[in-house]
Image (cartoon, rainbow, N blue to C red):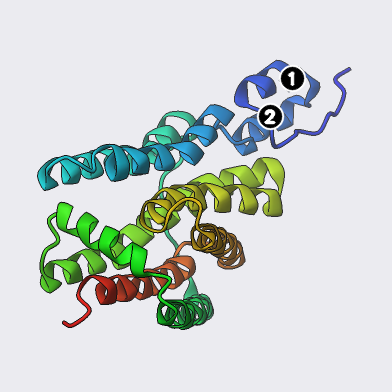
């Protein structure tokens, strides 16, 4: 007589198939449907690839022409953001969907985004008044120029792209794909910390390049980014969709590019 053994949500499909005989026949189909299909290899790849990619196009290709840097960025980002689609189609058989957050979700995301942005702008004003961003200014201008962003209008166009489109793609990648699948295995807080650290890691490359890897600013700002990732995971879980964390993320990115604009074009 089969033993009624509960399904552990962290099992892979192969493990469930091997143990499905321990589940009553009328529950076997349900068990195979609810167990997540993304293996640990897919989650590790999703966690580490953005950092590797950032090092390639931001550091290794720094001496290349603007065209090659833009090509490396575009190709790498295409791989990154198509990875969840391909994996979910081939392993999860799950379609992408974004549900409405409702008024409450959008209001909460807006409030969180404005609070983070306000704190960030205040911190920048305090730190820059002490001259702690002087080292970064020259490096940021050189990098922006190397990418072909030579005028305020081009800077504005890049800012809009990052604040609107790229912020959504990062929320879909780090919250919808990575965090949600980690949460099925580990629970909310371990998943939120893991995905927050993965979200932080590629920013360390950028901040370290500008501010120096030994600078306390690099690590303070990186930790702040990780905390932001955890907050957006919480917001995603609370609302059940991407719209609220996307709105929050977009506002924060807009604040970051406002600071970047001030550093690159201080008299514009």
Residue at numbered disc 1: 19
Query: Which residue lies at the image location 72% right of the left edge and 30% below the top edge?
Result: 26
Image quadrant assignment for residue 133: bottom left
Up-down relation of residue 239 to residue 206 (above or below)? below
Is label 2 in a helix, a strand or a loop?
loop
Q: Callout 1: 10 Å neighbours few (<14), some, many (20+)?
A: some
Query: Which residue lies at the image location 78% right of the left edge and 26% below the top edge?
Result: 24
| Position in image of residue 186 (x %, y %) | 70, 43
| Position in image of residue 67 (x %, y %) | 11, 44
Q: Distance between the residues labelled 2 and 1?
A: 10 Å
Q: In this view, does 266 lie to the left or right of 170?
A: left
Query: Which residue lies at the image location 45% right of the left edge and 72% below the top edge?
Result: 248
Is label 1 in a helix, a strand or a loop?
helix
* Residue 65 in sight: yes
Q: Mark 2 or mark 1, which has the lower sequence index?
A: 2
Q: Nearer the viewer, residue 28 or 124?
A: 124
Query: Which residue lies at the image location 29% right of the left edge and 37% below the top edge?
Result: 60
Residue at numbered disc 2: 11
Q: Callout 2: 10 Å neighbours few (<14), some, many (20+)?
A: some
């Amino acid at each position: 007589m089969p033993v009624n053994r509960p399904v552990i949500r962290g099992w892979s499909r192969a493990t469930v198939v091997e143990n499905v005989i321990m589940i009553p026949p009328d529950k076997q189909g349900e068990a195979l449907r609810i167990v997540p299909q993304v293996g640990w290899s897919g989650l590790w790849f999703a966690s580490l690839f953005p950092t590797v990619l950032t090092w390639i196009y931001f550091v290794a290709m720094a001496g290349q022409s603007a065209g090659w840097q833009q090509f490396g960025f575009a190709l790498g980002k295409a791989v990154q953001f198509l990875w969840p689609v391909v994996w979910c189609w081939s392993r999860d058989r799950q379609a992408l969907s974004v549900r409405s957050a409702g008024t409450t979700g959008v209001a909460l995301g807006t409030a969180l985004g404005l609070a983070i942005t306000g704190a960030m702008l205040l911190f920048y004003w305090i730190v820059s008044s002490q001259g702690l961003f002087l080292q970064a200014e020259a490096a940021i201008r050189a990098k922006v120029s190397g990418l072909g962003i030579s005028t305020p209008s081009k800077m504005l166009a890049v800012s809009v792209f990052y604040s609107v489109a790229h912020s959504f793609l990062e929320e879909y990648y780090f919250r919808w794909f990575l965090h949600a699948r980690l949460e099925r295995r580990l629970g909310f807080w371990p998943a939120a910390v893991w995905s927050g650290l993965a979200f932080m890691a590629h920013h360390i490359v950028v901040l370290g390049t500008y501010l120096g890897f030994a600078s306390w600013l690099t690590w303070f700002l990186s930790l702040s980014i990780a905390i932001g990732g955890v907050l957006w995971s919480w917001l995603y879980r609370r609302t059940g969709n991407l719209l609220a964390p996307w709105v929050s993320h977009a506002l924060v990115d807009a604040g970051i590019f406002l600071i970047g604009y001030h550093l690159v074009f201080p008299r514009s």
